Image: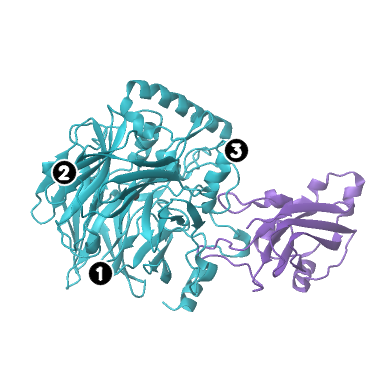
Amino acid sequence: MQRRQLLKNIAGLAGVGASSLVLGNPIATLVNSSTQRKADLLVNAKQAFSSAIKTSPTLLGLQNTTGNFPPQQLIIEGKLPNDISGVLYRNGPAKFERGDQRYLHQFEGDGMINSFTFSEQSITHQGKFVQTTKFIAEQQKNKFLYSGPLSQIENSRNVSLADAVNTANINVIPVNDEIWALWESGSATAMNAKTLDTKRRVNLGENSQYGDKLKGLAFSAHPKIEANGDIWNFGLSPSGHIALYQLSSKGIVKNVGMINAHYRGKMLHDFLITHKHILIILPSLTANSVNDSSATALFKSFKYDENLPMQVLVIDKQSLTLKKQFELDAGFAFHFGNAWEETDGTIHFDASINTNVDVMDELSELMSGKLRNLDNSPHTALFTLHTNGSTTKSSIEGDSEFPRVYDHLVGQRNKKLYTLSHTESNFWRDTVCCLDTDSGEKDKFVYGEDFIAEEHIIVSNTAKEGEGYLVGTALHIPSKRTCLNIFKADSLSEGPICRAWLPYHIPLGLHGSFKAS
Amino acid sequence: MNSTLTTICSIAMLFTTPLLSAKTLEFTIDGIKSSKGKIYVQLFKGEGNYQSNKAYLSSIAVAKQGQITIRFNDLDVDDLATDGADANDLNNDYAIRYYHDENDSASMETNLFGMPTEGYGYSNNAKANYGPVKYKQIKFYLTTETVSNTSTIVY
Ligand SMILES: [Fe+2]
């Protein structure tokens, strides 16, 4: 798209006019007056959690993290493969409490990057908080200063731009010689890949024709990195428009588009690419029209609507314009594994899908120490979008989340999908699984209920599906330690070939990446 | 003031016709981060004009790092205020919005989502919070005395 035309289109966006200098912010719609009561909720949450953990030690991974983790060599069990060279980075919310207050939702915690550096003989861990402006300010005052997407803080500082409350706590990807800590509603945060020191808030348009036009825009937490190195991503605007980004492997913007998705659901987490198209998949979320003025936080501003079909927006990667739309049964998915496209235009993709968004409330209750039952878990569904506009769906039995595929197959046909599920534990994911999407066969390893498994990712030196390793962390509850597990990617059921232990545990994280050296 | 006069004033922008009493407003902006470009200040009379973006007066000042004060003279004030009536009951409410045009483009730069990427602010030191500021946060009343108002710019 020509820049001029893009900017013209943008100018037509809702209320750029002077009387609405600042559009609605994606984090919350209003700050309300009854913050005193809300602050008490945070005090109650801290008390409830600290008493619950005494009887439910599995809550360990959601304990507040007070400081950075200095470099620490792991103790290795089994044989460390000599062909893994690089760093596994993971991100996740870690700072949950300040003073007598505890956040009401896991997603509110300030992000911490954990790195596991592989050398021939050893693995070294370190963990550092992302030094966002919010984190720095709250560290200095030693208290929460900003209301979050759910927690309302008394006398919260004003938020005119989402980045004021950017916690950089969802994912981390290598970009050029840096790593970028990613959030959902604001800018990426660039960090030193070795020291994990925070460098700057990324102004996407810098060094490009876009200048400051992309400053502060949402840059979501699940970019798709194509085999050629191009980084694709989207960002949801509070108005329901969606920005689309194509960056070079150096992190320089090549192309930006904007579509009006008319999306009222407020929360959009992941997306997909094929070799030709971007797929924006809108879940069945809609605006929650609340009368209760207390329910104005972002996480209360949307609700699941079982009568609202999911929508797939198929966008051309060259022109960044909408080409086709499909409707699917009502559903909600945080995560998608991969999409690919046949020569005749038929599109295939998978989703970890559910028929409600109760997980948001469940994760909130978990912060107060109430364990959530994983019976209400998403499962893998394989969707096909046919060229005649029809769709088909096949559901895979069993639950699944945190889907991953081989890096070289992002947007290309994959046959293996790696996910987490639960087997022995009712409350935590304790199983890693590789699904053969052709045969439906599964290759699984069950950690068992002493462990909480986190996202596992593929580390491979070859561009061949099934080769290399599956690597992931798990929290061992009885010994209160985190371990890093290495499986042969084609034989998970044989168990890890190597397990490396930290002498302590680190907070349960969300997503990460491996950067080969 | 009748609507014809309002329209004329809006077009003229730089002067106004005192009706009953002519008063002065001093507006101070601090926290200006550089002396690059200009500061554009718009004064609105009444909520309707603010919402429809019809400035009563505009002023452009050369930016100066730190603090500047902009003076509006000869503003209308209904003289009833001197009769002991509550100023709040009169049509003497005004509001200010301003921005720092650092790149001298004569417009406030925004990103593609319409959020400002240049410094801006409002009277009463009001700050946007998860959405636009409300008129009631930024309005103030003129009286027969000189009125001062301040704001710290937000970048
Ligand atoms: Fe995610």
Q: Nearer the viewer, mark 3 or mark 1?
A: 3
Q: Give the mark nearest the N terminus, 1 or 2.
A: 1
Check disc 2: other Cα within 10 Å, few if <14, some if 14-19, many if 20+.
some
Q: Secondary structure at mark 2?
A: loop
Chain A as rendered: colour = cyan
Q: Give the mark nearest the N terminus, 2 or 3.
A: 3
The type of residue carrying mark 2 is Ile
The type of residue carrying mark 1 is His
Check disc 1: other Cα within 10 Å, few if <14, some if 14-19, many if 20+.
some
Q: Secondary structure at mark 1?
A: loop
Q: Which mark is residue A275?
A: 1
Q: Which mark is residue A379?
A: none
Q: Secondary structure at mark 3?
A: helix
In space, the residues marked 1 and 2 are separated at their CA atoms by 35 Å
Chain letter belonging to callout 1 = A
Q: Which residue is mark 3?
A: A141
User: Count of labels shown?
Assistant: 3
Which corner quadrant holds the C terminus of chain A?
bottom left
Q: Position of residue A418 (x, y in %)?
A: 20, 50
Q: Quadrant of residue B2?
A: bottom right
Q: Nearer the viewer, residue A496 or A338?
A: A496
Q: Nearer the viewer, mark 2 or mark 3?
A: 2
In space, the residues marked 3 and 1 are separated at their CA atoms by 48 Å
Q: Nearer the viewer, residue A312 or A274?
A: A274
Chain letter belonging to callout 2 = A
Q: Quadrant of residue A317?
A: bottom left
Q: Which residue is mark 2?
A: A497
